[in-house]
Amino acid sequence: MRGQYLDSLHEVFTHKSSIDARIESRYSFINNSIVSVTGVRLGVAFQRKLRIGGGLSWLKSDYSSTFYPIEITGKRDTLKRFLKFAYFCFYIDFVFYKTKRWQLSVPIQAGIGSIWFQKGKVYNFWGNDHKYLLALYEPGITAQFKVFKWLGLAADIAYRFSAKNNNKIRKDYDGPDSHYKVLAWSPTYSFKISLWFDQLYYEAFPRSKITKKFGPAVW
């Protein structure tokens, strides 16, 4: 079984690679609220069975929390802050089942970045707000249905594990940190529309020099 897997993986790398460029949006939960995490990806794809690359992701939703720090006078203040995080990630996506229309794959990504609270909604990474290290690991599974050779519909579900210094965050803000616990162990899901421009070109211009060299379109 292991030998067959290695042979299959070796066979994938013997084919020409293509560019894997994507914009994606995933949904997750913070304190039982649904939030959106957006990302851009750039990598290489081998025979459409293995994709490897990196990218950048960030929290898109305007999620806020209220803190009650103690002032020098001894009175409690009320502060509203917006949660922000951004991280660089490495991803690998391997297809383990494929037919003409259907495809199942295992996407895995790991990332490292920063998480912080700030006054405004617009990202201000270079501000004076405290930044904390954020490390993530996210395995999942994706199901894809091909409508045409150049168009597909997909859905995936994953589970996000993260590591951060909760004690330091609680000390700095003197507020509840329950949302970090939810963020640390949180399922994610997304629905995608995939458009392969190279396959669309091969279908639209089957007699072109580019199609004859790199095509034709395939399922």
Image (cartoon, rainbow, N blue to C red):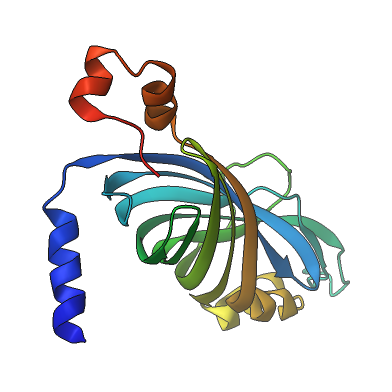
Q: Quadrant of the C terminus?
A: top left
Residue 123, image quadrant? top right
- Residue 81, how many percent across, how many down? 76, 56
- Residue 26, how many percent across, how many down? 62, 56
Q: In the current view of this chain or complex, which residue is farthest to the top?
A: 208
At horizontal 21% and vertical 87% (from top left) the residue drawn is: 1
At horizontal 54% and vertical 63% (from top left) the residue drawn is: 143
Of 163 and 119, which appears nearest the observer?
Answer: 163
The answer to whether 179 appears left or right of 188 in the picture is right
Establish if 69 lies above or below 16. Answer: below
Establish if 190 lies above or below 213. Answer: below
Q: In the current view of this chain or complex, which residue is farthest to the bottom?
A: 1
Q: Is residue 163 visible?
A: no
Of 58 and 119, which appears nearest the observer?
Answer: 58
The answer to whether 44 appears left or right of 129 in the picture is left
The answer to whether 3 appears left or right of 146 in the picture is left
At horizontal 86% and vertical 65% (from top left) the residue drawn is: 77
Of 110 and 216, which appears nearest the observer?
Answer: 216
At horizontal 58% and vertical 80% (from top left) the residue drawn is: 166
- Residue 192, how many percent across, how many down? 60, 49
